[in-house]
Structures are given as structure tokens and as C-alpha cells.
Amino acid sequence: MTTTTLTTETHRPTSGTTGAGHATSGTTSSGHAPSDGRTTRGGHLRVEAAPGPRYDEILTPEALEFLAALHEAFLGRRHELLQERQRRRADVADGIDPDFRACTRPVRDDPTWRVAGWAPGLEDRRVEITGPTDPKMTINALNSGAKVWLADAEDASSPTWRNVVEGQLSLRDAIRGELEFTNEAGKEYRLASRDIADLPTIVFRPRGWHLTEAHLRYVDRSGTATAASGSLVDFGLYLFHNATELVARGRGPYFYLPKLEGYREARLWNDVFVLAQDLLGIPQGTIRATVLIETLPAAFEMEEILYELREHSAGLNAGRWDYLFSIIKSFRTRGDQYVLPDRDQLTMTVPFMRAYTELLVKTCHRRGAHAIGGMSAFIPDRRRPDVTERALAKVAADKAREAGDGFDGSWVAHPDLIPTARAQFDAVLGELPNQVHVQRDDVEVGQHELLDIGSARRAGATVTAAGLRANVSVAVRYLDAWLRGNGAAAIDGLMEDAATAEISRSQVWQWIASGTRTEGGVPITRSRVEALLAEIVDDLPRTPGNRIEEAAAVFRQVALAEEFPTFLTLAGYSQHLVGSSADQPG
Ligand SMILES: CC(=O)SCCNC(=O)CCNC(=O)[C@H](O)C(C)(C)COP(=O)(O)OP(=O)(O)OC[C@H]1O[C@@H](n2cnc3c(N)ncnc32)[C@H](O)[C@@H]1OP(=O)(O)O
Ligand SMILES: O=CC(=O)O
Ligand SMILES: [Mg+2]
């Protein structure tokens, strides 16, 4: 067990970095920190996990001190903002629709401000590959030929302690050109270059604010221990170990920020950046952040989010899968008119999804920020040409639409999709690195367009028995993979991750709660889903180490409970992942 004591310096924010002028941060009621992030002496981080190979290179006393400083300064505000999420969710359940905020109108109406924009390695982001950070995936992603690699500790990661620490080791080694890997069959993996400036730019995605890290506890001056924040742990360790090295090698510490629900959460991130840069002696504004707009409340605060982070902001991304999940979560008790059809009928061309993506491009370009597109879930299969052909066609259409709409780049889930995605952006961008100059003044999107959720079913999309079965089956199979430590999986020709699995399980919950009938007139009830689940679980092949029964138990918890659990990862983490064999050091 490692125990360190916090020593921190006084933080002085740079003028204009924090506080939007339309509202103030305020001192936290918990007393953890004043709003400018200034810290006081006393807290420390406690490691509650067995040591693993080379874990001491990541969990150094200095790194833990740095994490302690971040926790001391920001844990209280994190807690308050999570409570605010609950309040806003309750409002929507009570019939108060999300809307653009009146109090932040001055920020939206002020045409003069711009974000910091791109930093070295981020000017051209036309194709970004995403994926987990184990050594093999790290090397494959960095050798893939994409412009950017989103190194993922969120949707594509099962947050076992092993994945958390070993993922940091992969990144640390890769950034220094030292990462190598040999698989069980003896195949050797090496980086195409030891100089990361020759490889895709790394943008690291820490866990969202809702997730905790059970193996690290922040112990405050009074001795009260609280589970660490997954966001601060992931962000802090990556920054601490790599910021200086990245800058020295012509890149920088860049982040994707997931699952924000509003501008106050962006302000929290900005304050984290300011304090972290101060503590590490890095010039303010070195960090760059791209925020995922992947919750319904955040779609109404895109400008404010950019504004709060403006000295660190590189852009926004349209995180379509979590966005759909957030829509379901927001309106899950509002009755039939808010019921979405089968997942495979929910395309990016439904009017409310087009409204969201077009507003995102317009907002970004108005402020000098990149607009990055989302993930098409179709993936190739090297053994199945028909599956590959379908994936390439679907991805080509998706990326062509995004490039035509003004996006500056987009995501792919698999290296074999890179040439297809690149071709669509090349056709629009040509020699230019991006199209941030393209203004979408033609886009008029308001509350009505963003909330026209019923438009999908009005246009003929339906809820079917096959859709119900697919949701149950995919959710259980994904949960099985997740419990075994794999946060992303290929299932029936699609990339499945935490976001897509959230859609599957929350659709089932909503369909039951809304008394939805399938197209064939069969009511979707809890007992019917229970029977379907039993059938599916019975039919699934048992491979060594499978955790299908536990996956089914988690599914019951998150899809069939009376109360809707806000995240499946929260339910699965504390009760099933922590302490499991997948959680142990490799
Ligand atoms: C909603 C969102 O947030 S989307 C972003 C989060 N989700 C993701 O990042 C998912 C990323 N994609 C993946 O993880 C993978 O593509 C999967 C799990 C879906 C499929 O992976 P596999 O089953 O290994 O696919 P497949 O067997 O076709 O892979 C072929 C090779 O490509 C590699 N590969 C596949 N996807 C990736 C990737 N995203 N990054 C790096 N390498 C990859 C595999 O490692 C494999 O390499 P190998 O031949 O050296 O063993
Ligand atoms: O993170 C991306 C998403 O679609 O969710
Ligand atoms: Mg997401």
C-alpha cells in the first residue's frame, strides 16, 4: 500500500481563463476548494490495490501527490455538479424540456470571442481512429495511418485497475518510442517510428465525471476517505507523466472530454487544466481539449462549453451514441411520443440527429474550433468479404455526409476503415487541413428541432420483436466482454462499446416503462423480456472465462429495475468489476 502526503502550491489563474462573466464559479459548500482551484495542505491519495509489474512507474509518490492536489481542489465541485445533473434530469421527467439558457445569452450573442484552436499535430484531423490503450491496440492505432488516435479510457474501456494502470504504461512507453509487444503466438509488434511526431497525434480520453476509481482513495485532512474520481486519475496520470515529453517531441497534452452535461462541467475541466498546468510548471494554454457533445443538455450549451474552455479548446465532437442514450435517459418516462424505434433504424439522417450535428458544425466554425464527426458502428471482418463490403459502403456514406456538412474530420473504429473515411474527407478538403473557415449561417436549429424526438417514428421507423431481441442479446454479450476486461467488442458486424450498450439496455427499460408494443402488436413487458433473456443466455456458447450469468444479472439491474440506473457502468463497476479476476494486475 502506498501513502503520500499532499504538498501543493498556491494557484493563480490567468486573467480571463475562468469565469464566463455570465455566472460565477463560487466557493464550494464542501469546503474542498475555492473556485479558482487554490488548494490547502493536508490530503493524500491512498492506493488500495496489489502492486503489479511496473505499476510503481505510474503510481510514483510525485504522481500521487499531484493527483491528491487535484482531488483536494476539485472533488467537492465534482460532487455538486453530479447532483446538479440529477436535478436537471428530474426537471425533464417533470415535463420541463431542456432549452437554451437565458442567463448565458450574452456569451452566445457576443460574436467576438474565439477559442485557442489547434496546437501542433491537431490542424488536420480528417481521420481519427479510436480504441483502447492496451499495448497491441496502442501500436496498431499508432501504425494505422490515421491523423489522430483517440486513446480511450472511456466508452471503449472496461475500467479494471489493470486497464487503468497498464493503459497509462502503454501510453507512457509509446510517447517515448519504447513500446513493444509480443502476443501469445509470438507475433511482434513495434511502432513504425520511435518519433511520435511521425505517428497519429494522441488525444487521450479520460473517464467521465460520473465514474470513480475504487483503487485510489482521497483522504482529506480530517481522515475522511472518498473514492477517487476516474476523470482526475486518468487525466492527472497522463498529464503528469507525459506533458513535458509530448511538448518536447513536437506534440502536446491533448484530451477528449466525455459525457459533459453542461458548461459548468466545462468550467470545472478548465479549472482543473489551469491548476494542473500551474502545478507542473507548464505554460497556461498548453493543454487542448475537444469536448464530446454527447448528452442532450450539452447540445443546448455548445457555445458556453467552448467559451468556458476557450483558452484550451480545440473543438467539439458529435458523440452520437451517447447522445442517443442521453435522449432516451432524459425522456424515458415521458410516454409514447418520446419512444425511439429499433437501434438499427435510428440513423444519423433522422431530423433531430441532423439538427444536432449541423448545429455543432455551425457553433464550432463560428468560434474557430474543429467540428469532429462521430462513429459509424459498422466494422469490417477480414474473414467475411460481405460484411466488409457493407461496412465500407456504410462508412463511406456516413463520412461523405459529415464532410459535406462541414465537419473537419471524423472517427473510425477499425484501421481497415481509414482509407474509406479519408477518401470522403479528401474529396471535400482537398489540400486544406480542415474547413473551419466554412460558416454554416444557413443552419437554423432551435429547441424544437433538437427535441423533435417523435420524428423518427413518424417517418415510419418502428419497434420490432427483432429489435427487442437484438437489444437484449447485444447488451448481454457486451456486458460479458466488459466484465472480462474488454470495453469494445465486435458483435454481429458492429462495434459495441459502453455507449452503444447503454442504448440497448435503456431502450428495453423505456419500452417496458412506456407500455410499448412491437410492430406485430406484442406488448413489451418485464416478464416477456425476462423470458427472452433466459432464452438468449441459454443459447450463448460458453467460452473459457465467460461471465454470462453475471452479465445477465447486470442486465436485469440496468434494464429491468423499477428505477432507471443512470449508467450501466456504475452498476457493473462496484459490484462486479472491482476485485474480479479481470481487475488483477497482468
Ligand atoms: C461510441 C464511441 O465512443 S466510439 C469510440 C469507442 N469505441 C472504440 O474505440 C472501438 C474501437 N474498435 C475496437 O476496439 C475494435 O475494432 C473492435 C473491438 C470493435 C474489433 O476488434 P477486433 O475484433 O480485434 O477486430 P479485427 O480482428 O478485425 O482486427 C484486425 C486487426 O486490427 C486491429 N484493430 C482493430 N480495431 C482497432 C483499433 N480501433 N485500433 C487499433 N487496432 C485495431 C486489431 O487489433 C487486429 O490486429 P492484429 O491483426 O494485429 O491482431
Ligand atoms: O463517444 C462517442 C459516442 O458516440 O458516444
Ligand atoms: Mg460516448
Image: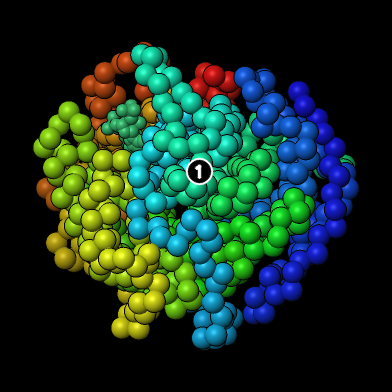
Who is closer to the viewer here, 330 or 481?
Answer: 481
Who is closer to the viewer here, 101 or 564?
Answer: 101
Give the quadrant of residue 329.
bottom left
Task: Tell me the quarter of the image containing the N terminus.
Answer: top right
Question: Does 287 sit above or below residue 533?
Answer: below
Question: Does 549 sit above or below residue 493?
Answer: above
Give, as a three-letter code, the residue at label 1.
Ile
* Left or right position of 485 against 178: left
The image position of residue 364, as x and y in percent, is 44, 71
Coloration of the structure image: rainbow
Question: Does 265 sit above or below residue 412?
Answer: below
The image position of residue 244, as x and y in percent, is 66, 47
Q: Is residue 7 visible?
A: yes
The residue drawn where x is 82% and y is 34% is 4
The residue drawn where x is 70% and y is 60% is 283
The image position of residue 501, as x and y in percent, is 36, 41
Task: Tell me the quarter of the image containing the C terminus.
Answer: top right
The image position of residue 111, as x and y in percent, is 51, 86
What residue did someone put label 1 on? 196
Tag 1's secondary structure? helix
The residue drawn where x is 62% and y is 49% is 248
* Left or right position of 413 against 45: left
Q: Is residue 567 visible?
A: no
Give the quadrant of residue 384.
top left
Question: Does 474 sit above or below residue 2?
Answer: below
Who is closer to the viewer here, 434 or 71?
Answer: 434
Neighbour class for label 1 at 10 Å: few (<14), some, many (≥20)? many
Who is closer to the viewer here, 132 or 415?
Answer: 415
The residue drawn where x is 55% and y is 72% is 115
**Disc 1 residue: CB within 8 Å of ligand 1:** no
